[in-house]
Image (cartoon, helix red, strand yellow):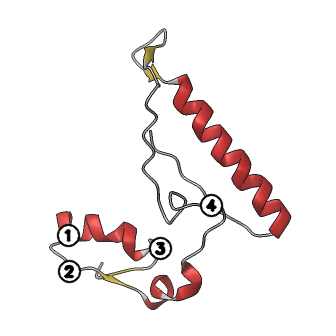
Amino acid sequence: LNVQYRMHPSISLFPNGEFYNKQISDSLNVRHRTYERRFLQGRMYGSYSFINVTYGKEDHDAGYSKKNMVEVSVVAEIVARLFKETVATKQKVSVGCIS
């Protein structure tokens, strides 16, 4: 692998520098202006977002997993707004959430 075709350059910057010694190039399709899409207004809704949920509290479930229902609520609200916007604009979007 010497060219990546899926990540926005602002996302590929970290793994490229940390793991690949800056040897991976971004393909033309991800560097094109149309790849820079914003579906929701606001600075935090770019290609990726780090959202600090200050009042969240991790709880343990019956097993070994942890859950944070405040984070779940924040993510659910953002995804609902995103869904509403994409329906209104008839655009397709792919979302990934890591908590």
- Going 43% across and 31% down the picture, which residue do you hit? 54
Amino acid found under the numbered disc labelled 4: Ser
On residue 23, the disc is 2
On residue 30, the disc is none
Extreme residue in the front direction: 42
N-terminal-most mark, 2 or 1: 1
Tell me the mark number nearer the camera, choosing from 1 and 3: 1
N-terminal-most mark, 3 or 4: 3
Whole-angstrom CA distance, mark 1 to mark 3, is 17 Å
Residue 34: x, y in percent? 59, 84
The quarter of the rendered structure image containing the C terminus is top left
Q: Are marks 2 and 1 in contact (CB under 8 Å)?
A: no
Whole-angstrom CA distance, mark 3 to mark 4, is 12 Å
For mark 3, does the 10 Å Cα neighbourhood hold few (<14), some (14 to 19), or many (20 or more) residues?
few
For mark 2, does the 10 Å Cα neighbourhood hold few (<14), some (14 to 19), or many (20 or more) residues?
few
- Residue under pointer 1: 17
Whole-angstrom CA distance, mark 2 to mark 4, is 27 Å
- Residue under pointer 3: 6
For mark 4, does the 10 Å Cα neighbourhood hold few (<14), some (14 to 19), or many (20 or more) residues?
few
At numbered mark 4, what does the secondary structure look like: helix, strand or loop?
A: loop
- Going 20% across and 80% down the picture, which residue do you hit? 23
Amino acid found under the numbered disc labelled 1: Gly
The picture quadrant where one finds residue 4 is bottom left
Whole-angstrom CA distance, mark 2 to mark 1, is 8 Å
Amino acid found under the numbered disc labelled 3: Arg
